[in-house]
Amino acid sequence: MPIHVSIHDVSPAWSTEVDQALAMCHAHKIKPGLLVVPNFHGEWPLQQSPEYVSHLQQLQKSGHEIFLHGFYHQSRTKADAESNIAQQARWLFAQRVASGGEAEFSDVTRDEAIVRLNEGERVFARTGLISSGFIPPAWSMHPWFIAILKERGYRYCEDHLFIYDPARGIKRASLVLNYASRSKARMASTIAYCRIAKYARRFFPTRIAIHPADMRVPRLREEIEHLLQWASGDVVERADDLFR
């Protein structure tokens, strides 16, 4: 089965770490997809970093796919989240288990989701970046969001379990391999998971997701290096090739 590699949270906020991840991928002759955040945590607006935008434009010209990756990559606070028990439970899972408070599209309303999608598309248009799809932060979104992407003709999206072609109305089960560095326990558990789960790629198209924070941890850099070496030769450059 095909394997696709991507670098998440691409932003001037993580420029050094993203370049390190790119260098690691290039050493294995892999051109990863780049998941770009238009205004990371509301403090790193892409349009105010023209040199970084130029860097991304050059990477896209050289064959790297660009994906819109949320807008802020940050969720609202728990106090701002809806207060019923079901919504609070959803918030706790998305923001404390699946992410460290960054599952932006998990707790937005439909109107808020459309506004942020519009804003992200405008930033990409103004910076000359062409999106190959939308991938929600922390792979977390409401089920109704796929229909919004379908209306706009998006051809690629993904969550923890599936890859989607919203425009064609199809989805496919997919394996994702990634690491968490927020605590020693999470790091150890994700390393163990990736070492075991990678063998399921015989049955599912597989995604390897690299996060910039991984580059700050020598143990994770080593694990990613081994994972890229294992994947080398079976990596596809375009995410939609995972559907083949």
Image (cartoon, rainbow, N blue to C red):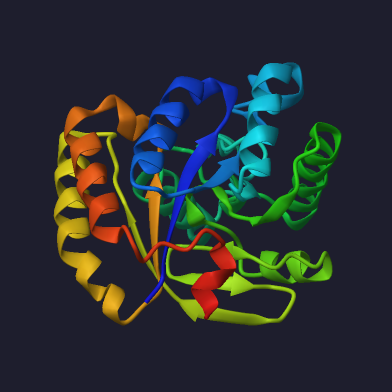
Give percent across and percent down for residue 139: 50, 56
Quarter of the rendering containing residue 219: top left
Q: Nearer the viewer, residue 85 or 221?
A: 221
Looking at the image, residue 204 lies above or below residue 42: below
Looking at the image, residue 30 lies above or below residue 56: below
Give percent across and percent down for residue 111: 80, 52
Q: Is residue 93 left or right of residue 156?
A: left
The residue drawn where x is 80% and y is 35% is 123
Quarter of the rendering containing residue 143: bottom right
The residue drawn where x is 51% and y is 23% is 15
Give percent across and percent down for residue 226: 20, 48
Q: Is residue 67 left or right of residue 190?
A: right
Quarter of the rendering containing residue 71: top right
Looking at the image, residue 171 lies above or below residue 129: below
The residue drawn where x is 64% and y is 65% is 156
Do we see residue 121 in this rendering? yes
Q: Is residue 4 left or right of residue 188?
A: right
Give percent across and percent down for residue 38: 68, 34
Looking at the image, residue 164 lies above or below residue 176: below
Do we see residue 37 in this rendering? no
The quadrant the N terminus occupies is bottom left
